[in-house]
Amino acid sequence: MRLASDMDYKVVFAALETVCEENIAIMCGPSELPYGAVAQRLVTCMRQIQEHGRALEPVVGGFTGVFHHYDFDAQTPGNGYRTLVKVLLSCLLHIIHKGRYIACNYTGAFFRADHNASEMEAYCSALCQLRALVYLAQRLINDNGFGQLYSLQEGDLSSRFVQEYSSMHKACFYGRCLGFQFSPTLRPFLQTVVISMVSYGETFGKQQSGLGLAALSLLTSGKYVIDPELRGAEFERITQNLDMQFWKSFWNLTESGLITGFSRIASCPLQVNFTLTVPPVTLRLPLASDPSLTATVSPPIAHWGPGPVHMRLLSYELREGQDSEELLALSRTDPPPISASHLPWVQKQPLSPWLLIHFHGGAFVAQTSKSHENYLRTWSKELSVPILSVDYSLSPEAPFPRALEECFYAYCWALNNCHLLGSTAERVCLAGDSAGGNLCITVSMKAISSGIRVPDGIMAAYPATLLTTDASPSRLLTLIDPLLPLGVLAKCVNAYAGADCQTVLPVVESSSLSALGRDTAVLLSDLTQGASNWIQSFLDPARNTSGTRSLLSTPRRSQRDQTSRTATDDSTPNCESLIDYPEGFEPLRSECRAFIHPTSCPIIRNPFVSPLLASNNLLKGLPPVHIVASALDALLDDSVMFAKKLRDMGQPVSLTVVEDLPHGFLSLSQLAKETEVASEICVEQMKKIFQQEKPTPILRKRPNLEQSYQSTNPSG
């Protein structure tokens, strides 16, 4: 549901008022309706929606008059204030559509009164919470500097936002209203993800892994399909209280052979796709200012000393060097993955002048290049370029700066060994999404500070440039985002910063065959137990309350959540007094309060962790940066503010904001036309980097910037 212009909000609010009046008149009219209490529920709901709409219209009008001041430029409309208005109007349009349906069909023989009342109540609850977010955004726009989306000064505004978030009701956004703000083609996928996550959370921690756990999750998912309210409540509990190991385990399901197998079937085939392990040896690279001199690059050493770096080489065509004995000796597969003698029908191509180095996303805590193959395969074909994707060590076992050290070492190794990768590296582009976008920027900052060659450009998709819980209008969306809730974001940030985590040496994973054997041994008992639980969930009326639970009142705390909430009762202040809402209004409160560990570790504000906080001196000399963000991403303001900062410094930068897509849209590129288009935009930005004219080199004095990095390097 796209709005034609910024002024459409008046039309939407007028239509909302009309629909509310029509439904109230019908339900309270002289003709006696057969629905009884359900009709009264609808009347109560429509009156509350009407009250919300009347209060919100002038506030939205105020935003539309000023939010253009927060855009990157006039040609790139996009910032958190625009997004909040867009999401709010999208919610209103759903209400209008449902209200018109009720008004036209309430006398029909097949009209499901209870179902439609529950749908309207869910959207009324969502509208109430969005109204609270709009008031929070008003507070931000008043307290922050003109044109500033963040308040980067130390203060209590962000802590108040976090405390308010911890008590607000969120379940309504994960039940019937799930994904209403995104492209309609993605909503079934989001529903599948949420149901899978809730089912997986229920079985997480049981004494099995892999196949057995997946079987249990499958059998418990049915009740969450038929009961949206139960699904929303469980998802809220999971996102607020389960620990980091759950999130790592769930996200790493994308690494399973079944999922990656389907991805490879749907993706274009590659001639080259295998993993490498590069030993930790000291490298020497020529200085950018004087190639006759060299700089020394040490292998990664943070936390546990020197260790190898793992990478994946992908290439649509077999090129010179990619089947060399020197490269295949670094392969982790046996027998070697590729050999010209084994593929006599494959014509070997010459070295490419381009090289793409990729850092994957995953919030610094999960996934590898394997789970990002779907779009990397497409990129390799469309760009006709070899891709080196780095499998850096993950947090919390390997917090900052281990991942940065490994990515920087991989970049330097690729420059020295580009001939083995099928490239002459005349043009080198760094590309990454989310956490990977952060690493693209910080690796380039490391190259500047080391005095070596800087990449020719960066393509960063929805990058994380500020790893704090500082409040911004787009980060208010973490209240409603099924893929990036604030509680999960804070856990990942703290894991990367090393807060309350002990680092451990990386371990060699057990073989998948042995894991499969263990799972097969317990699979039958798992299926039996899971089936029993699944059937019991339908027979137990206490667990199936669909259609009888009203979301219009403040959710009550369930006995099951008493334990999880106890830890937060003493540490979290009464949030109802933190924000001055208009008289007579109060958002719905959660029955399961979240505990958000504040991102107060000093490392978080290190410029090599949060490049938005870097000084101009550190950022000066970055190559052209092309950022592709989404209007509905909670990290949108990270992209806008970082692009503004580079532009104001005179650094080459571009920002593209796509519509109606969530954070992580690259991994969804095969699911919808909109995600395919967004991926194509990323490809076009990389083509600009590869095809740009080579600038005349400027000799500049090497800045003494390494001290800023080493001051917070735990290995130092």
Image: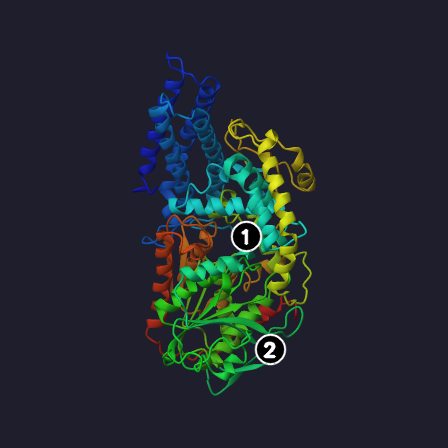
> In the visual, does 643 lie left or right of 410?
left
Kind of residue at badge 2:
Pro
2 vs 1, front mark? 2
Q: Secondary structure at mark 2?
A: loop
Residue at x 50%, y 64% (from the top left corner) = 370
Residue 181 percent coordinates (x, y)? 41, 42
> In the visual, does 74 lie left or right of 45?
left
Residue 8 percent coordinates (x, y)? 31, 38
Which of the 4 image quadrants contains residue 66? top left
Badge 1 is on which residue?
153
Q: CA distance from mark 2 to mark 1?
A: 40 Å
- Whichever of callouts 2 and 1 sits on the residue coming sooner in the sequence is 1
From this view, report whether residue 615 is shown above or below residue 592: below
Q: Residues within 10 Å of mark 2 (few under 14, many from 20)?
A: some
Badge 2 is on which residue?
280
Q: Nearer the viewer, residue 112 or 139?
A: 112
Kind of residue at badge 1:
Gln
Residue at x 39%, y 20% (from the top left corner) = 24
Q: Nearer the viewer, residue 580 or 343?
A: 343
From this view, report whether residue 281 is shown above or below residue 517: below
- Label disc, if present, on residue 524 of the rendered structure: none
Residue at the top extreme of this rendering: 30
Residue 690 percent coordinates (x, y)? 36, 71
